[in-house]
Each structure stands twice: as structure tokens, then as C-alpha cells.
Image (cartoon, rainbow, N blue to C red):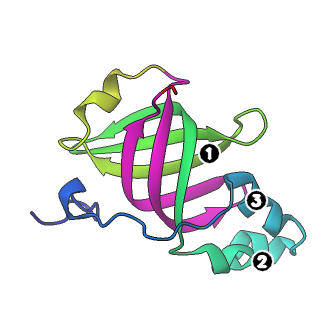
Amino acid sequence: MSEQCGVTPRAAIARCLTALSVTPEDVWNDGKSRTAFEQESGAAWEKYLHGCVKWTLPLKAVVPKGDILEIHFGAGRVGLLTVATRVRADDYPEVKLLAPGTRLNIEGRIESVQVALIALYDSLLSVETQQ
């Protein structure tokens, strides 16, 4: 099973052994004190790149792009900020059926951080279970 458009198949993704103990808000807030140039270039958030995170976030949107699903999650106090990842549609056919606001567990690695977007790669998803 090879990568498709740079997206690793679900079965080939290794689970995080040690996740960063930060929220999406912690990541963005760390860059707020940086210069506009550092924020624009992403330099403000370099220490988080490739770090593993485990977050539970509400689904914002699912954007089909051929064999890939681009999944957007709401973050921040009112959900205006976005955490996004791409997964293979064959690995997560049920995601397209979920309603916006459905809380999902996401485990992945930070690919990039911008002022209002955190992009993840090698992500594993599951619907949050109520306890």
C-alpha cells in the first residue's frame, strides 16, 4: 500500500508513543508574542513541527478531493480557528456521514502552523466515545 497524494494509508501509520501536552490554543498563543514576520513564515511555531498531538475536536467540514478527504476541525474559543488533516477516503468512509459538531479524537503530527490553521499529517481518527 503506497502513499496516495502524500497521504499515508491508515494501516501504515504508527501510533504516537508520546504526545505533546498542548492544546491547539496553546500552540497558537505561543506564536502571538512573535513578530508578524515570524508568524507569517511559521518560524514562531517551529518547535511544534512533527510533534505528535492527541486532541478531541468538533468536526467543522469534510472536503472530498478525489480519493482524499480533507477534514477540518473547529478550535479556539468559538471554533473560528481550524485544525486540518488529510486522510484516504477508503480508510474513513464513515467520516463523510458525520454531522458538523461531531467530536472526533484525532492523533497526528503537526505539519505546519499558520495564524489560524494547524495542519496535521499521518492522522488517525475516531469518534469520541461518551463515558
The mark lying in front, picked from 3 and 2, is 3
Magenta-colored stretch includes residue 82: no
Q: Amino acid at mark 3?
A: Asp
Q: Position of residue 113 (x, y in %)?
A: 63, 64
Q: Secondary structure at mark 1?
A: strand
Q: Secondary structure at mark 3?
A: helix
Q: Amino acid at mark 1?
A: Thr
Q: Main secondary structure of the magenta part?
A: strand
Q: Residues within 10 Å of mark 1 (few under 14, many from 20)?
A: many
Q: Position of residue 28 (x, y in %)?
A: 75, 60
Residue occupying the point 69% across, 73% down:
45
What residue would you read off at disc 1? 82
Label 1 – label 3 distance at C-alpha? 14 Å
What residue would you read off at disc 2? 38
Q: Which residues are magenta?
A: 100-129
Residue extending furthest left?
1
